[in-house]
Amino acid sequence: MGAENASLVMTRRVLLTVAGATLLGVWTADPVRPGVAAPRPPDPRQARPGRTGQADSLASGDRPASGRRPPGPHAPPQPAGKASDQPRLAAARRAKREASQMPMTSIDDGSKAIALTIDDGPSPIYTPQVLRLLARYRVTATFSMIGIEAQAYPAVAREVADAGHLLTNHTWTHLNLAWLAPAAVTEQMSRGTDAIHAATGRTPDLFRAPYGAWSPFVLSQCARTGMTPLGWSVDPRDWSRPGVASIVANIMRNTRTGSIILEHDGGGDRSQTVAALKIVIPRLLAAGYHFRTP
C-alpha cells in the first residue's frame, strides 16, 4: 500500500504540473494564433503628433523599411511642390497685369509738362468757344467725346479733330460702367468708338470711363481693344458749377509737373468752365507750364 500511495502522489503531481503549464500557456499565447506571444500594446507616451496634427503612435520597430522617419514635429520642412505654388504665382501675375492696366493719372514729358482734358462733348455751344481759346494760346488738348453727342454734332466733332486735338472715347451714352453687365460695357465702349470714327474719321486710342468708374472688365476691354485708360489728377469739379473763382483756385493750387487736368465742354451749362479757362490757361503758361497730350 505504501508503494501504491507513493505512485498516486507522484501521478497527481505530474498532472498538476502539466495542467499548470497548460493554463499558463493560455494566458500568454495569442488567442488567434496559438503558440505565438501577443504583441505588446504601444506605449501612449511614445505617440508623436504627425503633420496632420493627429497622433502618430508608430513605435520605433514599426518604421518603414526604407529607414525614413515618418513626418513629425522635428522633420525638416518639405519644399512646396509646383501645384502649391500655382495660386501664389497666378496672384502675382494678376497683380502685375492689373497694375500695368491702371488708368493714366499723370504724363511724363519733362519738367512743367501738363495735360488739359475736356469731357462730355462735343457741344454746339461750348466746344467752339473752347476751341477758339485753345487756338489763341496755341494749346493742344484732349477731348473725351460721348458717342451719341459726336453722332448728333458731327461737324463740331470734326472741328475738334481738324484742329489737331487728341480724341478720347468717353462711351456711347455716359453710363456708369461699374454698374453694367459685361455685354453692356462692351456695347458702350464699341459704339462710342464707332460714333467718333464715323464723325471724325479717327479711331480713338484712349478711353476715359464716365465718373472715373473703372472695373476689372473695363480695364480688360481697354487692353483687348488697344485703348489706354485715361484718368486725371486735378479735378476742379467744374461740372457742379462751383463758381469761376473756385475752378481757377483749384487748378492753380493742385497743378504740378505731370498733372492731368479735368474740365468739361458738354453735359450742361459750361459757361463757368469757359470763363475759368480764359484765366487759367494764361496763368499756367506764365508759370512756365506747357501743355501736352497723354
Image (cartoon, helix red, strand yellow):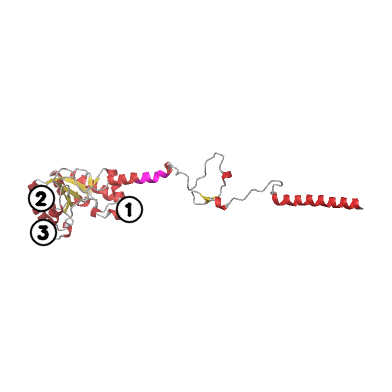
User: Which residue is the extreme one toward the right?
Assistant: 1
Q: Who is closer to the viewer here, 140 or 202?
A: 140
According to the image, label 2 marks what residue?
284
Instruction: Count neighbours of disc 1 (C-alpha within 10 A) and say few if under 14, some if 14 to 19, many if 20 or more.
Output: few
* Mark-to-mark CA distance, 1 and 2: 41 Å
**Amino acid carrying mark 2 in the image:** Leu
Mark 1 or 3, nearer chain start = 1
Q: Nearer the viewer, mark 1 or mark 2?
A: 2
Instruction: Count neighbours of disc 3 (C-alpha within 10 A) and say few if under 14, some if 14 to 19, many if 20 or more.
Output: few
Left/right placement of residue 148 relative to residue 30 reads left
Q: Who is closer to the viewer here, 102 or 269?
A: 102
Confirm whether the magenta stretch covers residue 87: yes
Are dots 1 and 2 in contact, CB under 8 Å? no
Disc on res. 1: none
Confirm whether the magenta stretch covers residue 254: no
According to the image, label 3 marks what residue?
245
Instruction: Count neighbours of disc 2 (C-alpha within 10 A) and say few if under 14, some if 14 to 19, many if 20 or more.
Output: some
**Amino acid carrying mark 3 in the image:** Ala
**Magenta extent:** 84-91
